[in-house]
Structures are given as C-alpha cells and as structure tokens.
Image (cartoon, rainbow, N blue to C red):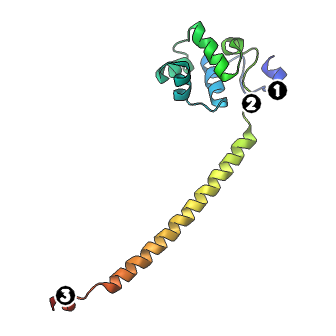
C-alpha cells in the first residue's frame, strides 16, 4: 500500500525521503526518542543518529527489529512503498499544546501569588526589626 492509498500523501514524499527520513519519522510517530529506540534494539544512540542522517545503514537483523518495533514494513523502511506509519494526529498535538499552555498560565499565577506573599512577609519582617536604640540597651 502506498502513501497515496493510505491517505498519507504529503507526509513522506516517496521521491525525496531517504531511509533516514523514514526511520526518524516512524520513530517519532511511535513517540520514541533516539535513546529509547537504541535501548530497545541494543545499539548506541549515536548509531540511531547515524542511521537517521544516512551516514550508516543497519544490518538485516537490526532492520527487521526496527520494522517490528516501529510497526512498519521492511519494504517501506527501504523504499517508502508498503506499510508505513500513520500520519501524526495533529488534533492530539493541538490538545496537548492547549493543555500545556493552560498549565503554564497556572504556574505563572502561582508564581505571582507567591511573589506577593513573599513581599508581605518581607514587609512584616522589616516592621519587626529592632531599632538601633533598642539594640544598645
């Protein structure tokens, strides 16, 4: 099944995507970091980075592991044809963004309130400070 048949046209261009592009896209679609993927297939993160930058290619056994972990076909990994990852859900990303923005606003309000409380405490402490004349006695 090609990307046009699955409705993913435009996400990966079969004409321009490299093995590294497809590997990176499939990894990200699964929500994995390079470190996560490296740990799961038993290589160093720099190896994943080299594969994604098309500086090196995995051996057949690693390619099979990658395809299985990333839920894509080996054929897709190599050529861009066949079963690839589903297009990212942009609605989910928008919801995550909105939730993070709301959390950020709440933290900012908490920070502002804490600043006001600190100011009041500092003012009370200044009023409680003994005077210089009282210290001499």
Which residue, as the protein is rendered here, is positioned at the far right?
5
Q: Position of residue 94 (x, y in %)?
A: 71, 46
Q: Nearer the viewer, mark 3 or mark 1?
A: 3
Mark 2 Cα-neighbour bin, 10 Å: few <14, some 14–19, many ≥20: some
> From this viewpoint, is residue 2 visible?
yes
Instruction: State the separation of the CA atoms marked 1 and 2.
Output: 8 Å
Mark 1, secondary structure of its residue: loop
Q: Position of residue 77 (x, y in %)?
A: 67, 15
Q: Nearer the viewer, mark 2 or mark 3?
A: 3
Residue identified by numbered label 1: 7
Instruction: State the separation of the CA atoms marked 3 and 1.
Output: 81 Å
Residue identified by numbered label 3: 135
Residue identified by numbered label 2: 87
- Mark 1 or mark 2: name the one nearer the start of the chain: 1
Mark 2, secondary structure of its residue: loop
Q: Quadrant of residue 33?
A: top right
Mark 3, secondary structure of its residue: helix
- Residue at image location 70% in from the left, 22% down from the top: 71
Q: Quadrant of the N terminus?
A: top right
Q: Are marks 1 and 2 in contact (CB under 8 Å)?
A: yes
- Residue at image location 41% in from the left, 77% down from the top: 121
**Vertical comparison of 35 with 78: above or below:** below
- Mark 2 or mark 3: name the one nearer the start of the chain: 2
Instruction: State the separation of the CA atoms marked 2 and 3.
Output: 74 Å
């Amino acid at each position: 099944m090609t990307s046009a048949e699955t409705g993913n046209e435009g996400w990966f261009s079969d004409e321009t995507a490299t093995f590294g592009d497809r590997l990176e896209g499939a990894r990200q679609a699964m929500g994995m970091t390079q470190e996560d993927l490296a740990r799961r297939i038993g290589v160093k993160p720099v190896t994943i980075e080299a594969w994604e930058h098309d500086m090196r290619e995995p051996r057949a056994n690693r390619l099979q592991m990658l395809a299985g972990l990333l839920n894509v076909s080996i054929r897709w990994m190599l050529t861009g044809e066949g079963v690839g990852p589903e297009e990212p859900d942009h609605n989910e990303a928008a919801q995550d963004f909105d939730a993070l923005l709301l959390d950020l606003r709440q933290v900012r309000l908490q920070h502002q309130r804490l600043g006001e409380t600190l100011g009041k405490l500092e003012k009370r402490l200044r009023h409680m400070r003994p005077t210089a004349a009282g210290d001499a006695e």
